[in-house]
Image (cartoon, rainbow, N blue to C red):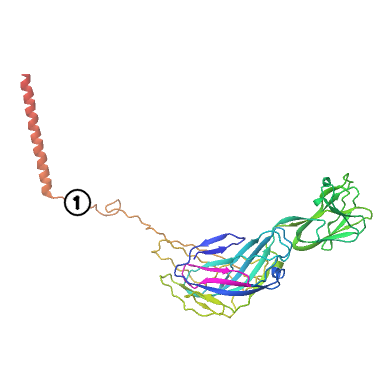
């Protein structure tokens, strides 16, 4: 079973080694009730049915993989927290508490993007699953117990223009809705609102981190006061009849102009109001532009916290010494556990030793389980290639959120001999070269044959010379 650990910042996937073939797994069915945040903007209280899968028998060095399938239990749904024309992202973080041989916490994570525009209350999709893992470095037995789930919503960065006739914009007395304006005026949607009444106001409630006021530049226009969340804006007044240097403009009906803008609001719901200052002067509104910057963390006010409402459940995991047949635990019944035939699952109503309080806006990077202080298992000299991983998570009890420290130590055993083999009799070995014995009689016979051949060759040479001498005479 391959294990998948989901992102830190985001989010990258890490593939870890497969669990041994002998490993058994337990499937725990856990029901949750979610409240606050995007649960409130949805059905109020949202019910989930989840299935947690945990291996029950491992060998030292195998990863402890924890995966969680998520789903809605009934018709209740999480809801979009605001009008969001570009969708958003649902992020889920779980808590899995470890006790026994290890004391610590895993934080399975996952996310899913919400496609398309949404209004407040639009039902949200959940990620199909979340996962996390930790490496095992020694024998022992630990208890794995699911804890809370935290569901966050992260809106995307965006800029959205809201036209003057949008029903979310409220107008006081004295405004006139002007439609079908000449295209050369460049008004948004070829329309705008206009007033000549002193103190006539318009307001708009939006969700974002910035806002722009868009209207015409015109000699006949007058100053407009701007308020954000009932406080004077920065600057508090804008005059569309004057340039930035204070001189009077020569423009008439020059529409689509961004006359005022503000950035740096905390993401959330805000209200902008504009008020005409002078009687008889034009106060105009063409559009607002809502700006949302990219957020480092999901807004805390959108977080839904999910508590277990089914009977508490837990699984015991036995980590063997790496033999071919790790000990198989005996099955134990549990009201909400659905273990496989050879899995071990047990009800554990006692409280987890690890604090579930999330604390900060977003969960800390996923800490892995902490083995109790002890030396790591030594690699076997006969192993072809071995690696020992020590993953450490330090959890401070009672603090706003767990603080995790992850340490990875790698050791390797070489797979080939470190001393080369030198042939016998080689240089600096201190050994005599190998000897080859031959028969003495064979040596004598070979020498006699060579002597006889030489004598016969000499006689033949003398006869040939005598023959040549006779022919000359």
Is 382 left or right of 228, judged from the image as shown? left
Vertical position of residue 347 compared to residue 204: above or below: below
Q: Position of residue 196 (x, y in %)?
A: 92, 55
Q: Is residue 312 above or below residue 239?
A: below
Q: Residues within 10 Å of mark 1 (few under 14, many from 20)?
A: few
Q: Residue furthest top?
A: 473
Q: Position of residue 446 (x, y in %)?
A: 12, 43
Q: Main secondary structure of the magenta part?
A: strand
Quarter of the image where one finds residue 74:
bottom right
**121 and 155: which is toward the camera:** 121
Check disc 1 and report the residue beneath it: 436
* Residue 422 left/right relative to 175: left
Numbered range of the magenta stretch: 48-73
> What is the quadrant of the C terminus in the image?
top left
Query: How far across and how far down the image is residue 58, in percent?
Result: 47, 70
Q: Is residue 28 magenta?
A: no
User: Residue shown at 6%/28% (left/top)?
Assistant: 463
Q: Residue 448 appears at what percent x and percent y?
A: 9, 42
Residue at image point 8% right, 35% down = 455
Q: Nearer the viewer, residue 71 or 132?
A: 71
Above or below, comparing residue 385 to residue 336 in the picture: above
**Total number of numbered discs in the rendering:** 1
Q: Nearer the viewer, residue 422 or 317?
A: 317
Which residue reaches farthest right? 280
């Amino acid at each position: 079973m391959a294990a998948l650990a989901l992102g830190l910042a985001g989010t990258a996937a890490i593939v870890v080694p497969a669990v041994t073939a002998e490993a058994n797994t337990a499937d725990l069915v856990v029901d949750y009730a979610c409240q606050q945040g995007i649960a409130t903007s949805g059905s109020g209280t949202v019910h989930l049915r989840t299935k947690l899968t945990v291996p029950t028998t491992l060998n030292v060095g195998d990863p402890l993989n924890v995966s969680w399938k998520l789903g809605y239990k009934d018709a209740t749904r999480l809801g979009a927290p605001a009008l969001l024309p570009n969708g958003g992202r649902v992020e889920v973080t779980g808590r899995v508490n470890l006790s026994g041989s290890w004391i610590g916490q895993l934080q399975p994570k996952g996310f899913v993007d919400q496609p398309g525009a949404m209004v407040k209350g639009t039902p949200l999709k959940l990620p199909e699953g979340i996962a996390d893992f930790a490496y095992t470095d020694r024998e022992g037995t630990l208890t794995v117990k699911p804890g809370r789930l935290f569901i966050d919503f992260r809106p995307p960065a965006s800029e959205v223009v809201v036209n003057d006739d949008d029903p979310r914009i409220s107008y006081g007395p004295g405004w006139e809705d002007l439609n079908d304006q000449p295209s050369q005026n460049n008004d948004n949607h070829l329309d705008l609102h206009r007033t000549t009444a002193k103190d006539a106001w318009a307001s708009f409630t939006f969700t974002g981190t910035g806002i722009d006021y868009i209207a015409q530049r015109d000699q006949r226009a007058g100053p407009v006061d701007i308020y954000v969340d009932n406080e004077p804006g920065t600057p508090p007044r804008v005059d569309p009849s004057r340039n930035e240097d204070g001189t009077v403009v020569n423009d008439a009906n020059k529409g689509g102009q961004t006359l005022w803008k503000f950035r740096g609001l905390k993401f959330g719901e805000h209200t902008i109001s504009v008020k005409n200052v002078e009687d008889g002067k034009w106060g105009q509104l063409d559009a607002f532009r809502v700006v949302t910057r990219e957020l480092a963390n999901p807004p805390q006010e959108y977080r839904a916290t999910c508590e277990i409402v089914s009977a508490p459940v837990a699984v015991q995991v036995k980590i063997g010494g790496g033999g071919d047949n790790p000990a198989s635990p005996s099955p134990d019944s549990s009201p909400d556990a659905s273990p496989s035939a050879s899995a071990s699952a047990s009800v554990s109503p006692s409280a987890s030793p690890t604090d579930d309080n999330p604390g900060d806006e977003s969960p800390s990077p996923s800490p892995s389980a902490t083995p109790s202080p002890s030396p790591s298992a030594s690699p076997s000299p006969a192993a072809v290639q071995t690696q020992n991983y020590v993953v450490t998570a330090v959890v401070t009890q009672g603090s706003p959120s767990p603080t995790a420290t992850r340490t990875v130590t790698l050791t390797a055993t070489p797979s080939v001999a470190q001393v080369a083999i030198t042939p016998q009799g080689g240089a600096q070995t201190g050994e005599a070269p190998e000897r080859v014995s031959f028969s003495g009689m064979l040596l004598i016979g070979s020498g006699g044959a060579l002597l006889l051949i030489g004598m016969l060759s000499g006689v033949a040479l003398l006869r040939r010379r005598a023959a040549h001498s006779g022919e000359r005479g």
